[in-house]
Structures are given as structure tokens and as C-alpha cells.
Image (cartoon, coloured by chain):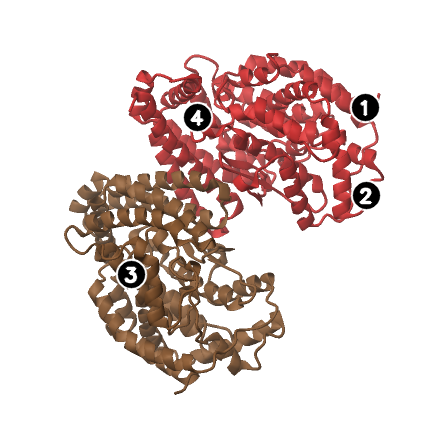
Chain colours: A brown, B red
Amino acid sequence: MSAYDELMAFTRETEALAQVAGLLSWDQETMMPRGAAAQRSEAIGAMESVLHARRTDPRLGEWLASAEAPDEGGAAQLRLLRHDHERALRVPGDLATALARLTSHAQGVWAEARAADDFAAFAPVLRDVLRLKREEGAALAAGGDPYEALLDGFEPGARADDLQAMFDEMRPALVALRQRALEAPERAPLCGDFDADGQMRLARELAERFGYDFSRGRIDKAVHPFSSGGGDDARITTRISAEDPFNCLYSTIHEVGHACYEQGIDKAWHLSPVGHGVSMGVHESQSRIYENQLGRSRAFCHFLYGRMRDIFGDIGVADEDSFYATVNRLHRGHIRTEADEVQYNLHVMLRFDLERALIAGDLQVDDLEAAWNDRFAADFGYPVGRASEGVLQDVHWSVGLFGYFPTYSLGNLYAGCLHEAMRAELPGLDCDLAKGDPGAATGWLRENVQRHGGLRTPRETIARACGGKAPGAGPLLDYLEDKFGALYPA
Amino acid sequence: MSAYDELMAFTRETEALAQVAGLLSWDQETMMPRGAAAQRSEAIGAMESVLHARRTDPRLGEWLASAEAPDEGGAAQLRLLRHDHERALRVPGDLATALARLTSHAQGVWAEARAADDFAAFAPVLRDVLRLKREEGAALAAGGDPYEALLDGFEPGARADDLQAMFDEMRPALVALRQRALEAPERAPLCGDFDADGQMRLARELAERFGYDFSRGRIDKAVHPFSSGGGDDARITTRISAEDPFNCLYSTIHEVGHACYEQGIDKAWHLSPVGHGVSMGVHESQSRIYENQLGRSRAFCHFLYGRMRDIFGDIGVADEDSFYATVNRLHRGHIRTEADEVQYNLHVMLRFDLERALIAGDLQVDDLEAAWNDRFAADFGYPVGRASEGVLQDVHWSVGLFGYFPTYSLGNLYAGCLHEAMRAELPGLDCDLAKGDPGAATGWLRENVQRHGGLRTPRETIARACGGKAPGAGPLLDYLEDKFGALYPA
């Protein structure tokens, strides 16, 4: 066997073990009995040790030194493996294991603290997580910016300053749109009897319409919806809110976007580094374009309005136009995951600045809740009432995801670019969407983005899909201006 | 750290990884999308490699050579670890790998052959499995009896000749009981509308009544019910048959017996060799005493009759006595897992004799189907119609489980002993059972058997619970004679 073949055989087994670790987390969020939390932490820690040992195995360095890529795909495999191997070598094994154990534990503490609206109950464990993440960031950065080193784990090649520039460009336009919209009378949410079975039935139907393959996945309920797994086992979750069926339906479409990316990657790449979505930003571009540019479009709302009335009867809106306006209503809310397309990115900017300051050591955990509340009041114009709708709303920091939030906005930006390119090539799309058929759009995304997995860098992936045009904020801002300018005229 | 502490820390991680491997199998049988089968095989293979490497790690031998047990529990840990390590060292790595590959393949061949009722399609691969198992038995036995060496993997310390003597003692009594019962008119099964939701609701209720802790477990549906996991995450499965609700209810109580054993082990032993049920036989004693001596008792049937009528309305039996007789009816069947308490052990004896002859080389695979059919006709008095209700009915041999079957009967024998001892100490038990409360019995089992896990050998475990009395077939035979003698008077 050549060094390349040996490397890829070893990597295939590592990838299979990484999928096992992913299944442990999926199970923890969906199936695991609540009394098993401590035992599960040990299992996750043990798997993390196994994976860390493989990722720092000395043979990897030898193989990587002499392996020759047989083709373009092989070159991409080697590039990704080198990137991961260098990162893995920088993090001491004890630190990796300690982080895995601590974050599994911290997630439970966060959930209890959130339920009790008690940031003080979460602060001590968050301090511990932050301490380890700062250590990890410093180890990864090797003299560079620790925050950027953490960010690089989710969005390879991304620069914190580029993100800052992107936010600076987006911010004034979003604030202006937002202010205009919130000066208009607030539109009421839906009103009706949205029974849980009906919501789940419709969620399954929408998942199938958006191309999710249930023979290689499944849908379950979770407190915080997520997608998980890959290849032939890409699972999604959703949640049910009795008052707000959009919560379930659009969470589902969002997670379907993530899962379809994984399901859409060429089978030849399964169980290899190229066989994953290339970055969190590109991943989010898929979930967001499914959810927003397709799922919240005027044309798809025509279809959804009819289906919802079939299933739930009267839903409290007079006609299709009102339904479309309700789907896209801007309102005074506190929760990122429930935010509309305009205010969502303001949520991300808040977290980006706070977590950068936490990692830099410029902000202490003890001051975090106050910093959050001050910033929120300044950005959104109304106060945070309780921790669960403020600093405790997201799971991310409890599980050590620092540097992750900005990839959400990067995903929105990429979705804007892809949507512009896709619309130019699919003139009949609205006609299909109005029939409840996003197949042409999801087919375009599969062909131009999804099937390539990690073959190219994140920016290259988007640029190739967009006819070579480098990604920027312009298309997203134009789209938002068109859509919300019409919904909330000056 | 002392050698003992290092050994136990290493072992704890191995135990956590073994639980992960168990979760993969649980997920495969309950949750996994059907398209993920090939991907899952790779994950299971990768986990097996990790576990095999740990179980043959050279450091284990060094630690075991110098470790000193701190106490009685530590001595049991070392005894169990030495037992497993010696066995692992005796089997050549190539043979272990070949067996793992072959049995994973053979299971699929068996399933297809069973579906086609075609033993000839299964015979070639069974010949290969048998050849490797005979090699493995010889390697493990190191000059002793290969069959006994295989048996020792499931029931440490058990002797084949002792089992033979036990069967010789049980056989005439069981045959006599069976003949008398089958001369009586055959009792009809239940008849009613047993909707699936009602069955699952009642199954959950029974699980709780029998002491299953849902905060450390869960119940799902599976084609073949099983229990899985341990410590704070011991899960059970059941199945639904629209015609026969006893299938669901008594499968549930049976699996609850297994799971309560695992849940009942002292927390201090979790994630260590002592922290498991001590043997397959003792495990089966718990599942069988829950299912039969408690769940199929006259007193508990009083309670169950009322609950089933509450839930399902008319169930086609006139009164409580008929209900009890129906729960315990003997009938002409071919399938071990559906057999009543009397005929069950005749099924096991048939398999024990055949598999012993196969391993000894006294019976060839080509002659196995005829040997099975002849023996069945002789023991049961009616012929086998097709291979799926005969030699192909059980998965065990396809996956290399030779020496496993007799532990089922050993479990019944142990259950008889425990039941006798328990009744002597709990005079008011029937009064509780009639109210649907087996708590005194399950509490007695937890205190006297379950909490000790693998602290003592299987026979010692049972003997201590029975006031020092060595286990034997007498109590089981007395119980069966009493119960079925009354149900089927001469």
C-alpha cells in the first residue's frame, strides 16, 4: 500500500469513530434518559481520547510527509488532513479530554440555569469552560490571535478582521430596515389550534418536499433543534410550540438544509475529510437559503398557506398576503433563533463582540450578563427581562463553541450570493415554489455546492457556484432591501 | 498511582467504550434509518478494533502481574480481569478477526435462509463458523473440553457435565407434565381489540411496577426484544402483536428483569468488571423470575386481568381463573421464545445436546437439520414443518454463540431457587402481587442478588441469596409441579 492509501484507510476508520462520537451527542439530546448524564460524559470523554490519539498518531505525520495525491480529490484530502493534523498537534491531549468532559457536563448545568433564569448558577462552569477555551485558543494560535484560531476550526481560512468589516458594512443597512419596520404597527402572530401531531406531520412533509431522504435520516424532537451525522445517516431534530407552528416548520426546513448538504455529498467522499460540509458558514448558507430565500418566499408562502389551512383550519390570517407578511413579520423579540432575517444578524454581531472580548480577556464572565443586557438594549432598543431570553438563550458557550456565532452571518451572506446566482439560472422557480416544489432550487444547490463537500475552500466553493464572483454582502443586502422594503414601505 | 489504580482507570475507560459499542447496536435495532446499514457496519468494526486493542494491551498483563487488591471488591475486580485477559490472550488475533468478520456475514446469510426456509443455503457458512468456533474452543480450553471453554465465556465456572446432570434430572418431570397438559383440550388464546397504544401504555406501567427506573432507562420497539446498556443507562425494548398482547407485556417484564439487574448494581461498581450482571445464567434468573414466578403468578394475574379489562374492554375470557389459565396455557408450538415454562427447557436441552455434538465433531452440519427434526419429533411428539420453525429459528449459532443456550435453563433453575428462598422470607407477597405491587419481591432480589453484580461467582451469588443452599433443580421442579399440576390435573 502507498502512504496515501495507508493514510486514507486509517482516516476512514477515524471518520467512522467520529460518527460514533456524533451519535453519542445526538442520543444525548434526543433519547438518553436524564439520569445517564454523568455516565454519558465519561463515554464522550473516552471517545474523545480515542479520537485525539488517532488525530495525533505519529504515523499521520509520516504518511502526510510522503503521501502523493492521486488526483484533485486526493489533493483536497491531503490539504484538509494537514490542516486538522496541525491543529490537533497543537492541543495537549489532557486539555482535549478535559474540554470534552467539562462541556458535556456544562451543557446540563446551562440547561438547568436557563430553566431557572439564573445566570449565577451557570457562571462558575462557564468560567471553567472559558479558561480551557482560552488555553486551547492560545495553543492553536501559536502566537497569533486565539479567537481567530478558534474561528478557523469552524471556518477554515476566515479572518476576524474580515468578519468585522463585513459586519460594519451590513450593520447600517440592517439598522435602518429594522427601525423602519418597527415603527410600523406590530403584526400579530398566527392564531389557531396547532396540535402537535399536525405540526410533526407537516414538518415531515416539508422535509420531504425540500429533498430530505428519510431512508438515510430521521426526525426527532429536541429542546434546541440541530442536525447531526452525515453520509447515509444524517439526522435532524425540531421542536413543537403550541402557539407558534412556524417555530417547528421553519426549524425543520433549516435543519433539512444542513442535512441535505451532508446527504448530497458524492458517495465517493463518504467517510473521508472531503465528505463533509466544507465549513460552518457554507453549511449555514444551505440551511438559511432553504429556510429563508426559499421557505419564506412569497411563492412558497402561497403553497404553505393552503397546506396549513388544510391541516389546522382557521389560522387567524385573512388572506395569503397577510400570511406572507406574518411569516416575515419583524417584531420585538429577544431570541436569536426566532429572529427574522433582518434582526438575526444584529444578534450575531452582539455575540461576536462579546465572545471576542471574553477570549481576549477584556470581558470577565462575572460581567457578561450586564454586558449582554446593556448591548442588547442599545442595539435593539428594549431591555432583556430575564436571563433565559438573554445571555442564557444559546447553548453554544456551554459546549465550548467560541468562534462559531459569526459563521451564522457568513452563512446568510453566502446564501445571498447563491440566491442571486440561482435566480439568474432558474427563471421559473417561483412557479415551482408556489406548487410546493423547491426541487429545481435544491437540485441547483446540490449540483453547484453540496455534492463537492470539502473539495475546495469555503470561499472558492461559493465563488465557483456564483460563476466566479467573490462572495460579498451586496446580494444579501439587496435581497433584504427588496423584500422588507416592500413589506415595510417607507 | 499504584498498578491497581492504573489498571482500574484504564479499565474504566474501556468499560465506557464498551457501553458506546452497545449503544451503536441499540440504535441499529431501534432508531437507525435503513439506508445507514453499511455505514453502521464500519462504525461497529472500528469500535471493535478499538476495544480489541485495549483488551490485548500489553500493559494489562504488567498491571495484573503486580496489582494488589485493596479489599474484597478489588479482589473480585482482579479475578474478573484476569479471567478475561487470559481468555483474550489464548485466542490468536487472526482467529478473532476471522470470527468477527465471518459471523457478521453469517448473520445475514442466516436471516435470508430463514426467510426462505432453506437450511442448505445456511449450511456452508455454518460449517465455516463451526470450524472457527472449534478452533477457538480448543485454543481457550488449552487441553480441556472445547465446549466447556466456550460455555465459560457466558457462565464462568460452569461445567458441561453438571449441566448434563441438571438436564437429566429435569427431563422426566418436564416430559410427564407436558404430556398430561397436552392431553387436555387446548385452551384458546385471548380475543379482543388490543390497540398498540394501549399495549405500550400498559407495558410502561408494568415496567414501573416491577421497579424499572425510567430516569435511567427507556423503552422502545424492536423486532426481537432485548435489553441493553447498564449502570445509569439500561434500556429495554418490546414488540407489539395485535393478536397477542401477552407478547408485548411479558417481553417487557422479562427485559425489565434484565435491566433492573443492571440498574440495581451498587453505583460504586459502575464502569468496572464487577459492575455487570455476573453471568448469563444469573441474568436470565432475574428476567425469568420477574416474568414467570412473579408476572405469571395467580396473584399478579388477578391484578393484570383487571387492568387489561380497564384498557382493552372485553378480552375474550370469562373470569380470572380462565385468564390465569390462558396466561399459563401449554400449547403445541415450535418456537423456543414463545414456549411456556414447562416446554421451554425441553427446547434448550435439544440445542445443548446438538451443539455439544457439533463442537465435539460427533455431528456434522450436513446432518444437523435431520438430527434437529428427529429429536424434536421425539421430544415434543409432533413434527417440524419447515426450517424456520426448526433448526433456523434462532440467530445464536450464526453469530457464533455456542455454549450460550444452556444458560437459559440455568437461569430458570436459579430462578426456582431464588423464588423458594424469597417466598420463605416474604409471606405476604401474594397479597402485594394481587394489588399489582411486586416491590417486596424486586426489593428482595435487589438486596440479595442484583446489587452485588460480579462480586462473587455465579453459583456463590445464588447460594448466598438462598441462605447458603447450593443451587439445584429441585425448587424449580417443585414449583412447576405445583403450578401446572393444578392447572392440568391428572
Cα gap from disc 4 to disc 3, whole angstroms: 47 Å
Say which of A460 and A116 sits in front: A116
- Tell me the mark number nearer the camera, choosing from 4 and 1: 4
Name the residue tied to disc 4: B273
Subunit of label 3: A
Q: Amino acid at mark 3?
A: Leu
- Tell me the mark number nearer the camera, choosing from 4 and 2: 4
Name the residue tied to disc 2: B316
Residues marked 1 and 2, same chain: yes
- Tell me the mark number nearer the camera, choosing from 4 and 3: 3
Q: Which mark is residue A354?
A: 3
**Residue A293, percent from left and from top:** 40, 74
- Tell me the mark number nearer the camera, choosing from 3 and 1: 3
Q: Considering the numbered disc 1 on the image, is that residue within a helix, a strand or a loop?
A: helix
Question: Does the residue at mark 4 contact the one at mark 1 (Cβ under 8 Å)?
Answer: no
**Residue A61, percent from left and from top:** 19, 43
Sequence-first disc among 1 and 2: 2
**Are there few (<14), some (14-19), or many (20+) residues within 10 Å of tag 4?**
many
Name the residue tied to disc 1: B486
